[in-house]
Amino acid sequence: MTVCAVAGRTDFTFPSADGVSEVRAVLWIPASMEEDRAAGRTGAPGAFRPRGVVQLIHGMAEHIDRYDDFARFLAGAGYLVCGHDHVGHGDTAPTAAHRGRMHPEHGGDALVADVQSLRLLVSQQVAAEVPYFMFGHSMGSLVLRNYLPRFGKGLAGAVLCGTANQPEVVAAAGNVLARAIVKVRGADYKSKLLHSLADGAYSHQVKDARTPFDWLSRDPAVVDAFIADERAGFMFSAGAYATLTELAARANSPAAYRATPHEVPLLFVAGDADPVGNCGRGVARAAEAMEAAGGRDVTLRLFPGMRHEILNEIGKEEVYDFVLEWIGERS
């Protein structure tokens, strides 16, 4: 693990489960831990006792630094926060040309395994009794919904933000199409057809949209910053779409709902104007399915008027406070 400390943040890397990539990750350190580190009171591994740990799992075609404001908010409340750039994203991608690329055969499994690798690394730094939470946004929520059946035991809670909830058969059909394009054009091929059927379709669901990314937020400054960010907004390859659709199909399968540890508290949050979650209807169906499968603590909260990135929306403070309160009640 390569480490470089920066005032309240620590950037480091670890090997990806894809066997090729070096994953870039970040820790946001609460003041109490930072003071101990500065004074040399680090103690043995596992000695730190923050209020809890929150692991962030970012979405499609973005990077973990876009969560800096939210992470600092949580760290300010006493939580140790961590997150990483997925394979094919941010600074985990070795070059700009590699952004949006994922292996069509093991891409989804690698994304899930990398989440677990980071959890294990961070867990070693805190006491065993410190509660551990995960927060997954958009594609990150699909990764998390695939993660929970395999590795969810022991979590204090999981927040599923802006999740998609396509019927399993629809996602499976998308997967067949993506794999057919991979077979003909190669895994790294950027297909306008796949883009238009997936994230590209959301731009058409906002009336009088100013840009193709208005579906992300009502705040023009957020949209403009996303467009200007060279590490965001890139097109997925056919191989990456094969990974994404596989994750989506698995996430909404009856088997996944049944296998998710029912004792783990789950919070579904989204904007009720978010096309990814069918304006809240798909999110509600996912929450209902999880509860019907046996979930003992399932909460649904839809924020009126908000679009896809509720952490970057007008009125985001309400979202921040609600998530913190929900986590705090389970810490």
Image (cartoon, grey):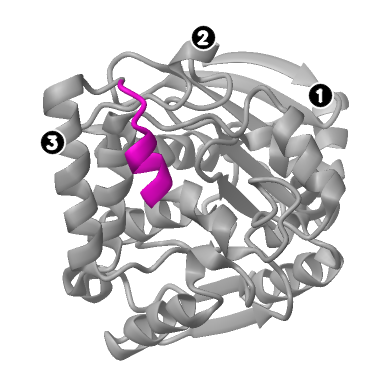
As helix, strand or loop, the secondary structure at mark 2 comes to loop
Amino acid type shown at disc 1: Gly
Front residue of this view, candidates 319 and 309: 309
Name the quarter where the C terminus is drawn.
Answer: bottom right
Q: Report the residue that reaches farthest toward the top.
A: 95
Q: Which mark is residue 180?
A: 3
What is the spatial separation of the Cα atoms under label 3 and label 2, in whole angstroms?
A: 26 Å
Residue at image mark 2: 95
Closer to the camera: disc 1 or disc 2?
A: 2
Please report contact status of discs 1 and 2: CB closer than 8 Å, yes or no. no
Horizontal and vertical percent for residue 181? Answer: 19, 32
Front residue of this view, candidates 320 and 151: 320
What is the spatial separation of the Cα atoms under label 3 and label 1, in whole angstroms?
A: 56 Å
Which segment did they paint magenta?
189-197
Residue at image mark 1: 40
Closer to the camera: disc 3 or disc 1?
A: 3
Q: Which mark is residue 228?
A: none
Q: Report the residue that reaches farthest toward the front.
A: 208
Closer to the camera: disc 3 or disc 2?
A: 3
Horizontal and vertical percent for residue 326? Answer: 67, 75
Horizontal and vertical percent for residue 45? Answer: 57, 32
Q: In this view, does 139 lie above or below 44?
A: below
Q: Image quarter for residue 325?
A: bottom right
Q: Is residue 159 visible?
A: no
As helix, strand or loop, the secondary structure at mark 3 comes to helix
Amino acid type shown at disc 3: Ala
